């Protein structure tokens, strides 16, 4: 989760769900909305046809009218969702009407979404729960325009109802710190047949205290390793994942301080059983190698900037 109740309103899209005011709870609901005074829920449900790969985006406004400090988030989604995320569109300079879109088309029409869209929350596991340290929040602006994505590959002979529900809980205690986050990736990738490794090194342009670290790849990846990088030398392992479908979300209870000029090297280890080279791309048949960082302070300009990679791109 990255970024930043008055009256709660339901949006006809089905992207946003009203909070529960105590009028009854559905016993079959995997994640009932929080009570109105506690927060709100973002929900997304769609049908994935048999044998299809679906990547859909829904756009709507958060049902808030003022800044909402958030310290705790819980999500539940259909097992096997390739990825789900919620993005704030304002930083990408994209102003879309509320509605349902083909994500492939959106990212083609608005390339700024890839680099400048701010991911507020993301999940690749069926259930996930995040709690920030005390006095630390994501401070979400009221009526914020967001885009929620679901990417699902249905290899079965029957349609599947894919869903995602996210409970966002209001923080009522005083706070002194706000979070920010960013993703680091190399889109110039060539995964040849057989075994190979892609690596990227980045350094922070300003000091941070790291709270969470995760990775994202596709099915050819066997392992991701992230090590400390002091600007010259690769050091200790700080993250490892060997499950591409449900990558680990590493939580640092004692924040990991990273000075300016220091950062990370992340390696993605692949086995390509085919005869063709696989390249970077959004489809499940393509590949990716990236990490996501969540940290304080909540300053947009604090980033881990790529300085070198295995393909020589800087």
Image (tube, helix red, strand yellow):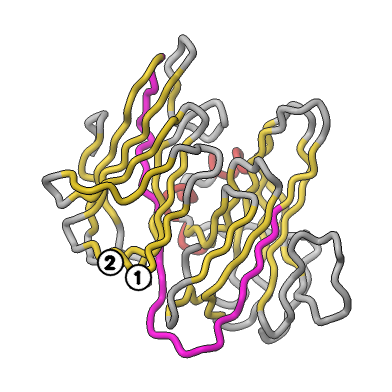
Q: Is residue 189 positioned above or below 170 on the image?
A: above
Q: Contact (CB < 8 A) between labels 2 and 1?
A: yes
Q: In this view, does 47 lie to the left or right of 118?
A: right
The picture places residue 245, in percent across and down from the top left corner, at: 55, 39
- Give the number of the disc on residue 208: 2
Q: Give the range drawn in magenta.
A: 164-193
Q: Can residue 102 be seen in this view?
A: no
The picture places residue 195, in percent across and down from the top left corner, at: 37, 19
The residue sitting at 18% across, 44% down in the picture is: 234
Q: In this view, does 276 lie to the left or right of 80?
A: left
Q: Nearer the viewer, residue 213 or 36?
A: 213
Q: Does the magenta stretch include residue 251?
A: no
- At mark 1, the secondary structure is strand
The picture places residue 76, in percent across and down from the top left corner, at: 67, 57
Q: How crowded is mark 2: few (under 14 residues within 10 Å), some or many (20 or more)?
A: many
- At mark 2, the secondary structure is strand
- Give the number of the disc on residue 296: 1
Q: In this view, does 113 lie to the left or right of 63?
A: left
Q: Is residue 172 positioned above or below 85 on the image?
A: below
User: Going from the N terminus, do you reach mark 2 or mark 1 first?
Assistant: 2
Quarter of the image where the C terminus is located = top left
Q: Quadrant of residue 178?
A: bottom left
Residue situated furthest top in the rendering: 275
Residue situated furthest left in the rendering: 232
The residue sitting at 39% across, 22% down in the picture is: 191
Q: Is residue 167 visible?
A: yes
The picture places residue 99, in percent across and down from the top left corner, at: 72, 55
The residue sitting at 43% across, 51% down in the picture is: 214
Q: Quadrant of residue 98?
A: bottom right
The residue sitting at 75% across, 75% down in the picture is: 19
Q: Does the magenta stretch include residue 180?
A: yes
- Give the number of the disc on residue 96: none
């Amino acid at each position: 989760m990255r970024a930043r109740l008055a009256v709660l309103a339901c949006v006809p899209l089905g992207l946003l769900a009203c909070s529960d005011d105590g009028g009854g709870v559905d016993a079959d609901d995997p994640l009932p909305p929080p009570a109105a005074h506690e927060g709100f829920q973002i929900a997304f449900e769609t049908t994935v046809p048999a044998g299809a790969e679906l990547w859909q985006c829904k756009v709507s406004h958060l049902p808030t009218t003022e800044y909402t400090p958030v310290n705790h988030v819980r999500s539940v989604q259909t097992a096997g969702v390739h990825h789900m995320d919620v993005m704030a569109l304002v930083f990408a300079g994209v102003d879309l009407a509320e509605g349902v879109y083909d994500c492939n088309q959106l990212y083609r029409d608005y390339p700024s979404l890839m680099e400048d869209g701010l991911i507020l929350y993301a999940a690749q596991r069926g259930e996930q729960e995040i709690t920030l340290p005390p006095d630390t929040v994501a401070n979400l602006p009221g009526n914020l325009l967001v885009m929620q994505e679901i990417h699902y590959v249905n290899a079965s002979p029957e349609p599947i109802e894919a869903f995602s529900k996210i409970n966002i809980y209001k923080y009522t205690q005083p706070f002194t710190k706000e979070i920010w986050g960013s993703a680091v990736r190399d889109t110039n990738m060539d995964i040849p047949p057989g075994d190979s490794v892609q690596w990227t090194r980045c350094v922070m342009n300003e000091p941070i205290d790291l709270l969470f670290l995760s990775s994202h790849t596709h099915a050819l990846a066997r392992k991701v390793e992230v090590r400390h990088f002091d600007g010259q030398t690769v050091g200790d392992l700080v993250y490892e994942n060997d499950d591409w479908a449900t990558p680990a979300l590493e939580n640092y209870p004692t924040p990991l301080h990273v000075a300016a000029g220091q950062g990370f090297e992340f390696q993605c280890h692949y086995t390509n059983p085919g005869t063709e080279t696989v390249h970077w791309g959004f489809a499940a048949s393509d590949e990716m190698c990236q990490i996501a960082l969540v940290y304080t302070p909540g300053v947009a300009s604090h980033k881990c900037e790529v300085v070198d990679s295995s393909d020589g791109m800087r």
